[in-house]
Amino acid sequence: MSRLLTRIRTFLARPAVAICAFLCCIGLSGYIFATQFLNVGNDNTCEIVFSLLNPRRRCEKDEPPKKQEYDLLIKTLNWRIDEWKRNGEATHVTVYFRDLQNGPIFGINEQEHFAPASLLKVPILIALLKYAEEHPQVLKENISLGDTIPEGQNEFDPEKTLEPRKVYTVEEVLRRMIVYSDNSSKELLRNYIEGISPGIIEQTFIDLGISLKNTDDSQFIVVKSYASLFRSLFNASYLNREMSQKALSLLSVTEFEDGIVTGIPENIPVAHKFGFLDIAENQRQLHDCGIVYDPQTPYLLCVMTRGKDAPTLISIISKISESVYAEVSLRSKTL
């Protein structure tokens, strides 16, 4: 044994050998450190290396970004919007688009202010379902209008509205508010939810980063800001998965079958909400915003308009929806 140790010492005493041995030790130490402390080569490497990223994205395989340019579509839509304005068919048209799979976004006149009208029913829906996450029994509670119907004409004459003194569950009133865009249901639910959880609707706007107030205290909405409501539902980032699904399920069976819906094939589901405001003669606003569930590329589309009459504005929204769907569909086939 002593002879072996003597030979090893003599061998290592040579300068070149000593240097090689030193470098080997460094390499071995580095490998041990990497495998033991950074888990390099193990399945959990990405969990450590990318610890500050979204947990869902940490271990996904990196793919080269898909370049999605919509320049031609944007130019076409701008040209058509200018034409509608010149012809007096609309005074303002705003468009917001977002590819919910690959992320490309574009907006046209997206900083315009519009009256939200019935679009405000979606935040009430979200606020109530947020409360229901911790108090699920609330959806089964019974409520009624009492003897009077709240003020506010129902938009586009909904097929069904609430009857005075008749008792309904909160869930049924919620369904009527979204599916039929019933204003009586909206007022009843707004008063009910504020009664059991004061300030919850305003807090929902704050949580989602949406501002509604003009400097003169009138209400307005910006298309990009409002579109974020649908994106939060699609990603289940504000409501949990169950409540996000419930909200989108109601929005996908709304009775309003014009606007965005008429611009795409019948077999493509759409979860959307429209809003209409008749301010005065020749001063009307019509909006439609929602998610188009194209099988290859689900996307978010919001169109807000001002003009003389509702049928013309509906037609404009439909034509924009048709153009957007045609472009998305074409891209889906070529990717």
Image: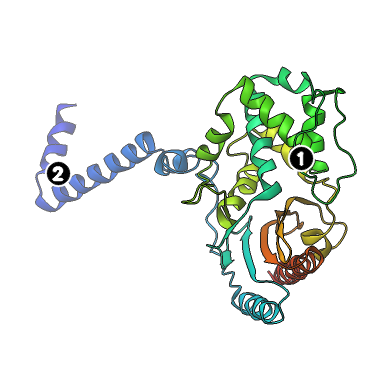
Residue type highlighted by circle 2: Phe
Q: Choose between 38 and 290: the one closer to the eye.
A: 290
Q: Secondary structure at mark 2?
A: helix
Q: Is residue 120 visible?
A: yes
The quarter of the picture where the N terminus appears is top left
Mark drawn on residue 169: none
Q: Nearer the viewer, residue 275 or 319?
A: 275
User: Horizontal and vertical percent for residue 165?
Assistant: 85, 22
* Residue at image location 66% in from the left, 61% down from the top: 304
Pinpoint residue 326: horizontal percent, then vertical percent. 76, 71
Front label number (2 vs 1): 1
Q: Is residue 324 above or below residue 214?
A: below
Give the Cα separation between the discs numbered 2 and 1. Answer: 93 Å
Q: Quadrant of residue 301?
A: bottom right
- At a point 75% along the width and 23% down the height, the residue shown is 139
Left or right of 261 on screen, residue 132: left
Instruction: Name the amino acid type tagged 1.
Output: Asn
Q: Quadrant of the C terminus?
A: bottom right
Q: Which mark is residue 11?
A: 2
User: Of the residues under marks 2 and 1, which one precedes in the sequence?
Assistant: 2
The colour scheme of the drawn protein is rainbow
- Mark 2 residue crowding within 10 angstroms, few (<14) / some (14–19) / many (20+): few
At a point 80% along the width and 23% down the height, the residue shown is: 146
Question: Which residue is nearer to you in this view: 322 or 281?
Answer: 281
Q: Please state if 119 lies on the left or on the right of 148 as rendered.
A: left
In this rendering, position of residue 100 left or right of residue 154: left
To which residue does mark 1 refer?
Answer: 183
| Residue at position x 66%, y 76% in the image | 81
Q: Give the total of numbered labels.
A: 2
Relative image position of residue 255 (x, y in whole percent): 85, 48
